[in-house]
Amino acid sequence: MIKSKQSQKGQTLLILILLSTILATIGLSIAQSTIQDNQISQLEEQTKRAFSAAEAGIEAALKRGVDIVEGDLEFPGIKSLTAIYTSSQTQNYITPTLDNNRQFTFYLNAFDPPSTFGSPLPETQLVEILPTDLDVNTMCDSATTAFAVELTFINTEARSIFRRLIDPCSLIEDTLDEWSFDTQTQLSDEANALVLRIVGADASFNGARLTVSNPSADWPAQGRSIVSTAQTTTGVIKKIRLVSSYPQIPASLFVPSF
């Protein structure tokens, strides 16, 4: 009987030790989970704070029309905030995706907002236009990818326009003055702006981007971007980019000639 009681006491002590160990482990797990939750909550809060400050930087830059540099704006918990205007020039400009009957105004020479056009380019200027994401050899195989492009060249000084058409899929009948994709072609007349209008095969057309190439020099910037960067005092950084194209000539000004 004495041995049995001692054995029971030993088992009870062992059970108590095991329970204590389990409870301690659970306590540590709960504490660790709480710390992690707090860290995540703090990170989310800091991210939201940085994002709000970056948005405010964009709004301030748009309102003032100039760069926002460090010290111009101050927010609680924000270490630094800048919103910088940028513009880029390139020989190969890629348009946004254009749906059926949508158009895009492309400035052949430097444009000074809000309404000053650059001088017209000479008639010898070479221009090359091609689909950005489609193969010219296979784009006509499906109505979802087949399209034509109407090109309206504008000379704001002479107040004149002339039109050309790129129609590899023969979507438009009885047309003249056609260009070809992926071919360098002279303007044939002076112009300082170009309106590109997409004509899809039918309603199933998925839209397309166009690349406008200049073989001899960079095209002028087609708009401006604002890059706003905010950093919190804890080191969280948030960056927002707003892209704004120059004014688009309304489609209502043109009556299709093809």
Image: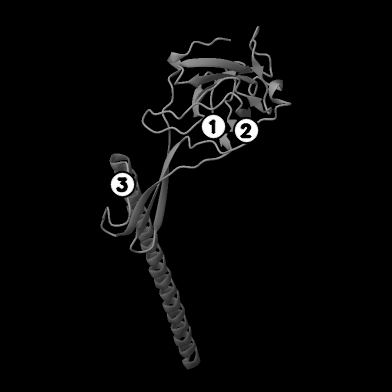
Q: Residue 81 bears which disc, if any?
A: none
Residue under pointer 2:
132
How dense is the environment of label 1, judged by Cα within 10 Å: few (below 14), some, or many (20 and up)? Answer: some
Identity of the residue furthest to the top in this view: 174
Amino acid at dot 3: Ala
| Residue visible at 32% across and 44% down in the picture | 66
Residue under pointer 1:
95
**Residue 218 place in picture, x, y as percent:** 56, 39
Residue 209 sits in quarter:
top right
Contact (CB < 8 A) between labels 1 and 2? yes
Amino acid at dot 2: Thr
The secondary element bearing badge 1 is classed as loop
| Residue visible at 42% across and 80% down in the picture | 16
Q: Earlier in the sequence, mark 1 or mark 2?
A: 1
Identity of the residue furthest to the bottom in this view: 2
Residue under pointer 3:
56
**Residue 36 place in picture, x, y as percent:** 41, 64
Amino acid at dot 1: Thr
Q: Earlier in the sequence, mark 3 or mark 1?
A: 3
> Viewer-nearest of labels 3 and 1?
1
Task: Using residue 49 as the reference point, say whether residue 102 is left or right of it.
Answer: right
Contact (CB < 8 A) between labels 3 and 1? no
| Residue visible at 52% across and 29% down in the picture | 108
> Viewer-nearest of labels 2 and 3?
2
**Label 2, label 3: how many angstroms apart (C-alpha)?**
35 Å
The secondary element bearing badge 2 is classed as loop
**Label 1, label 2: how many angstroms apart (C-alpha)?**
9 Å
**Label 3, label 1: how many angstroms apart (C-alpha)?**
28 Å
Task: Using residue 248 as the reference point, say whether residue 63 is left or right of it.
Answer: left
Q: Quadrant of the C terminus?
A: top right
**Residue 39 place in picture, x, y as percent:** 38, 63
The secondary element bearing badge 3 is classed as helix
